[in-house]
Image (spheres, helix red, strand yellow):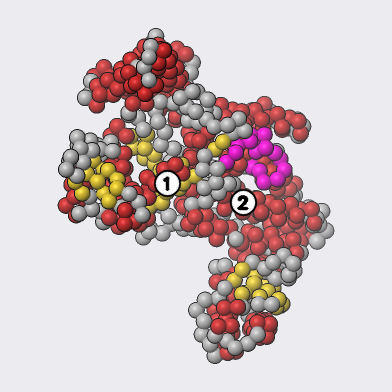
């Protein structure tokens, strides 16, 4: 139970006893740094129902609390704010209660609550994963873990875009230029091999456009008449018609990509419970169109196309079925959402991790599903995120100028190695220990740098800045965790029993207060779908710990009772760091 929950009924009782007034809500805020206090009650709302000046009102309530509530030690009133100082005993009791709780902060799953499905990654099978996919995967995975920690059942899923003209471009280029090259023969990951031929197609396409324009065609004519694009379109028609040769090639090359993706996901530390494939879902939703027509949700135009008119909602008319009877992406997404609930009937909401260029699409999708009458449609959320830029500029897949996810992870590990070696603190490590540590630091730096930023904001990713061992970075937090582990290893005495200390140093108290916030931060992060809240809470906790570390003796403390408590407090801080970083998909090293 939080401090505000503990104090609210006591303050309500005080107001009733002092002023014969009943109030439903008490407003609290964090006490400002320049004033003494652990929590602040805002007095101004009470002035609407109690005739008094705020200072007099605050003093009366404060005196009542000191006399009647054991948790309250003293108070001060500043203008319309009652700053309440909480007794050390409250924090000591709280600490002893949670000291041995390995799951502190994580809520127990409620079996009555509906599950949440979180979709992320959802790549095309014509290229390897890149830096943009890294942000997508890290966000989706972390949000899924945070929602799970908040007490809900979670399914992690993705829909793989494994069909369409972009897939046929890679297939055709491989057929023309590949000479039977395979991942094994080229010693290249399958997704990289297929991506290579996607780039080759674009080169050949541009060359043909240039030749046609040289012969007098306009650019638009050249783009449509280039032989290689006509061949790719013909291959797509054959795929849709079930041509055996095309389907066999498609299956072979897609499997290369799936195997490559699996390696990247493993290295990135993300996983999935359920996979969907566009080749299986692209026809879904067509049957729902008739249901929508019968309900009056959709309307049919004279040419046979089917639309939904959302102009009353400030949007526009959106097509859901072409005049030739073929589905559009919106139709497919409607059908896929419905299919997911059929597959997992306990799903009561979904989170779609997709870039902010699709904001409009998801507004329309969610509105259509609500109009079709699905009760779970009110629990759909678009985890919209900004793009990731590099100092060198924007990435382009067709031109092969993307930052490959695998290369990025290797570069981060190499950067961590260089900085660690420059610091010169790993002399006692074996080669294997060093390799593992470099990866832990490098990936921790990458993940933290991306996740500490609010998802909606665009990121300029600077690899060197992210692997700094000072400031708001992953390595800085990892280093603090490792420092605490060193303290625990050196503690050659029993520190398992409950602490009997009676008074807290200011730095100890501030640290316990920061730990106490962890459960609430998880709930807020889950509700806001924001790993940044977890990341920045952890940084604040580490800053508070380092201030504590600099201000008091721990192992050098002569009073055994205080020494035991400070080691216990250090250990709990480390546990919370590890638990918080687990939610971000980041490992912590025992030594550093």
For numbered disc 2, what is the local secondary structure?
A: helix
- Would you say 582 lies left or right of 331 here? right
Establish if 16 lies above or below 215: below
User: Which residues are the magenta region?
Assistant: 459-474
Q: Earlier in the sequence, mark 2 or mark 1?
A: 1
Q: Position of residue 482 (x, y in %)?
A: 69, 43
Residue placed most toward the observer, 221 or 543: 221
* Crowd tier of the residue under label 1, counting other residues whose Cα lies within 10 Å: few below 14, some 14–19, many 20 or above: some
- Residue named by callout 1: 359
Residue 473 counted in the magenta span? yes
Q: Position of residue 576 (x, y in %)?
A: 61, 52
Q: Residue at x 70, y 71 (%)?
A: 37
Q: Residue at x 34, y 21 (%)?
A: 221
- Would you say 476 lies left or right of 319 here? right
Q: Position of residue 133 (x, y in %)?
A: 48, 35
- The answer to whether any part of residue 404 appears in the image is no
- Kindly give the residue lying farthest to the front in the view shown: 216
For numbered disc 1, what is the local secondary structure?
A: helix
- Would you say 292 lies left or right of 426 here? left
Residue placed most toward the observer, 507 or 449: 449
User: Between tags 2 and 1, which lies in front?
Assistant: 1
Q: Which mark is residue 147?
A: none
- Residue named by callout 2: 536
For the residues marked 2 and 1, what is the alpha-carbon distance in whole angstroms?
Answer: 26 Å
Based on the displayed image, in which of its 4 quarters is residue 509 positioned? bottom right
Q: Residue at x 55, y 68 (%)?
A: 1
Residue 365 counted in the magenta span? no
Q: Position of residue 368 (x, y in %)?
A: 30, 51
């Amino acid at each position: 139970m939080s401090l505000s929950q503990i104090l609210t009924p006591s303050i309500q009782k005080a107001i009733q006893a002092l002023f014969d007034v009943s109030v439903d809500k008490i407003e609290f805020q964090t006490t400002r740094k320049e004033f003494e206090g652990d929590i602040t009650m805002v007095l101004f709302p009470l002035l609407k129902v109690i005739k008094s000046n705020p200072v007099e009102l605050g003093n009366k309530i404060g005196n009542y609390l000191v006399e009647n509530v054991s948790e309250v030690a003293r108070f001060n009133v500043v203008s319309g704010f009652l700053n309440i100082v909480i007794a050390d005993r409250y924090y000591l009791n709280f600490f002893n209660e949670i000291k041995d709780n390995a799951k502190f902060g994580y809520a127990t799953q409620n079996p009555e609550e509906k599950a949440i499905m979180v979709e992320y990654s959802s790549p095309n099978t014509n290229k390897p994963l890149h830096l943009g996919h890294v942000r997508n995967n890290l966000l989706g995975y972390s949000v899924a873990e945070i929602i799970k920690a908040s007490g809900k059942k979670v399914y992690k899923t993705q829909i793989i875009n494994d069909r369409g003209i972009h897939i046929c471009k890679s297939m055709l280029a491989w057929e023309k230029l590949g000479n039977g090259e395979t991942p094994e023969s080229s010693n290249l990951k399958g997704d990289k091999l297929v991506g290579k031929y996607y780039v080759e197609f674009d080169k050949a396409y541009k060359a043909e456009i240039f030749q046609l324009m040289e012969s007098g065609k306009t650019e638009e004519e050249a783009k449509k008449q280039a032989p290689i694009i006509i061949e790719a379109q013909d291959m797509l028609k054959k795929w849709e018609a079930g041509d055996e040769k095309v389907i066999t090639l498609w299956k072979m090359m897609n499997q290369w990509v799936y195997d490559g993706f699996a390696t990247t996901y493993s290295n990135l530390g993300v996983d999935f419970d359920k996979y969907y494939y566009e080749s299986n879902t692209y026809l879904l939703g067509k049957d729902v169109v008739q249901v929508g027509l019968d309900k009056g949700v959709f309307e049919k135009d004279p040419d046979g196309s089917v639309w939904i008119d959302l102009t009353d909602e400030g949007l526009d008319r959106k097509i859901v079925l072409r005049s030739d009877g073929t589905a559009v992406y919106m139709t497919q997404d409607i059908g896929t959402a419905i299919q997911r609930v059929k597959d997992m009937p306990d799903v009561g909401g979904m989170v779609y991790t997709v870039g902010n260029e699709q904001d409009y699409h998801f507004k329309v999708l969610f509105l259509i599903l609500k109009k079709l009458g699905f009760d779970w449609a009110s629990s759909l959320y678009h985890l919209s995120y900004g793009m990731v830029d590099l100092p060198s500029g924007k990435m382009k897949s067709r031109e092969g100028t993307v930052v490959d996810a695998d290369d990025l992870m290797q570069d981060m590990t190499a950067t961590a190695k260089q900085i660690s070696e420059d610091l010169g603190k790993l002399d006692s490590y074996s080669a294997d220990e060093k390799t593992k540590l470099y990866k832990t630091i490098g990936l921790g730096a990458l993940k933290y740098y991306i996740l500490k930023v609010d998802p909606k904001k665009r990121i300029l990713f600077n690899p060197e800045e992210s692997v700094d061992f000072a400031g708001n970075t992953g390595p800085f937090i990892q280093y603090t965790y490792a420092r605490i582990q060193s303290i625990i290893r050196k503690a050659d005495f029993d520190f398992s029993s409950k602490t009997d200390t009676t008074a807290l140093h200011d730095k100890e108290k501030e640290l316990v207060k920061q730990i106490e916030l962890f459960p609430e931060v998880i709930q807020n992060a889950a509700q806001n779908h924001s790993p940044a809240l977890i990341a920045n809470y952890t940084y604040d906790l580490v800053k508070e710990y380092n201030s504590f570390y600099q201000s008091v003796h721990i192992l050098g403390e002569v009073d055994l009772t205080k020494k035991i408590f400070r080691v216990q407090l250090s250990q709990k801080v480390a546990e919370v760091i590890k638990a918080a970083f687990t939610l971000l998909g980041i490992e912590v090293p025992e030594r550093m």
